[in-house]
Amino acid sequence: MQISFKYSSVVFAAVLGLAIVAGPQRGMAQRFSHGGGGGGNRPAPAARPAAAAPRQEARSAPAARPAPEARTVPEARPTINGGSRNNGNHDFNRPVNVRPAANVRANINVRDNVNVYHTGAYRGIHPYYYHPYRPYYWGPHWHPLGFFLASLAADATWFNFNNQRYYYDDGCYYLPNNGGYSVVPPPVGAVVPSLPDGYETTMVGNDTYYYFGGAFYISTGQGYQVVVAPPGAVITELPTGAVDQQVNGEDILVYNNTYYQPITQDGQDAYEVVPGPGQ
Amino acid sequence: MNKKIFFLLLFGVVASVQLRAQKAQAVQARRIDTVAVAILDKMSAMIGDLGSCSVTVKSNYDVTSKELGLIKHSDEEHLYLHGPDKLLLKSEGDRGGRDLYFDGKTLSYYSLDRNQYGQIEAPASLVEMIDTVSRRYGIEFPAADFLYPTFVDDILADSKELVYLGLTTIDGKECYHIAGMGTDKSFQFWVSDDAFTLPIKMVIVYTTKPMNPQYEAVLSDWQVNPTLPDAMFDFSIPLKAKKVKLVPLTAKN
């Protein structure tokens, strides 16, 4: 009797162990390997996710307050895991040894700027990340909107578009004005033969756009065509003349009727084109 | 003889060049979006600061059947954690009703359906206990990966790709959507876009296993730093419950 009881206990134990482990196949790894991954070399500082930065507002000086009473600091409360050990100490450049491509199935095929979610006005693909607006100048031959020149450079070109003669030089578009020439917004649809050095390339979905001096272009057989700024496009510099607008507590920059949301990408300050109101 | 040596040397050089080429192919460049990393960092920091928490985890997971393909199973689990060393897990679903209690020294497993229980000594801290018990006994805790203090570094160590896809809504809650590709799995995380930045959903697809089984977990009803009495983590042996021995995983497993 005793022997059979011992035997049945062993069987129960084995069954319980198997039930925990095997059925239904919970034993297959649902978790990530945790080798205690080291931090490695400290790279560029990690970007901050969306959090409205405190705005600088004019305030009157607060009334003088009595000095706070000294108080004892409470003992540190034990946490559920001893505290995160990841913060900002990541080695992004370390390559990963992978199996040959045939054994890897890419379930997702995205680009950084894919607008997977049409999130509506003032919400870009990237989280809002405030950084100060610092106007950018694209060299000595580039001028901001409204700039007046008495004469153009010798290598400036011209073209007719929408019954107007435009002049083009180093990414700037001019119309005759008051005996000279003024910089005007690039006419959407116009085609120029080339872009100056220093243009940016940005992807929105599968489409390639080019950006220079506040204007967006696509490549055509004849050159580069001016297009409306595509929502989701990410660029790194804005020209002088952008206006700061507060929208839902966020600073959105508006330049030439295009709305730019400050973001960060790969540790760099950048801007994302977002839909304007009513778009 | 000289010819033999020459050809041997030539063969060695050719073989060496081929090996290097294969190694170069194997080590591929990575695409890591720092926005995704920053979101996961913030989530991990938030979890690391919790003194206690509770969450409901509803999981679905595939089991491979040769005859029928992928069979989906599901569980609903309520997890309670109190730092540094207390855990209560109450689970219902396809694996039956189960409770797990950890009081800092002993992990107690109780099967409600069989009225049986087993107990093992375990390391004092929650993460060490979870890790040790998982390795030795195959006992998994729902969405436990998020609890590891090195979660983000561990993800990065295995990821060829990690990208931030944008904002979406899960059960009415706006979330950051992150996707990644590791050496043997692809994964997606949804992290709440609110003051707490907590994990809301996780999907894993095992890309190297036949039929690519999936695991999905939805985390809801998060309670941050609730007051959890110590008594709720103490296991009291139910009436007429039988004690059994928890069996460690064997080498074959």
Image: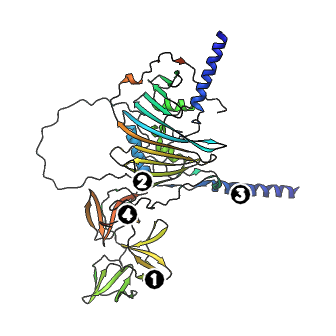
Residue at x 37%, y 38% (from the top left corner) = B222
Return the residue nearer the eye: A178 or A259.
A259
Q: Residue furthest left?
A: A63
Judged by depth in the image, the label closer to the viewer, 2 or 3, is 2
Label 3: which residue? B17
Q: Does label 4 lie on the same chain as label 1?
A: yes
Return the residue nearer the eye: B217 or A274.
B217
Which quadrant of the rendered structure holds the N terminus of chain B? bottom right
Label 4: which residue? A272
Return the residue nearer the eye: B12 or B72.
B72
Q: Give the quarter of the image for residue A247.
A: bottom left
Q: Could you tell me the amino acid type at mark 3?
A: Val
Q: CA distance from mark 4 to mark 3?
A: 45 Å
Q: Could you tell me the amino acid type at mark 1?
A: Pro
- Looking at the image, is A166 positioned above or below residue A74? below
Q: Does label 1 lie on the same chain as label 2?
A: no
- Looking at the image, is B152 positioned above or below residue B166? above
Q: CA distance from mark 1 to mark 4?
A: 26 Å
Secondary structure at badge 1 equals loop
Q: CA distance from mark 1 to mark 3?
A: 46 Å
x then y, percent, for residue B90: 45, 30
Q: Which mark is residue B35?
A: 2
Label 1: which residue? A193
Q: Could you tell me the amino acid type at mark 4?
A: Glu
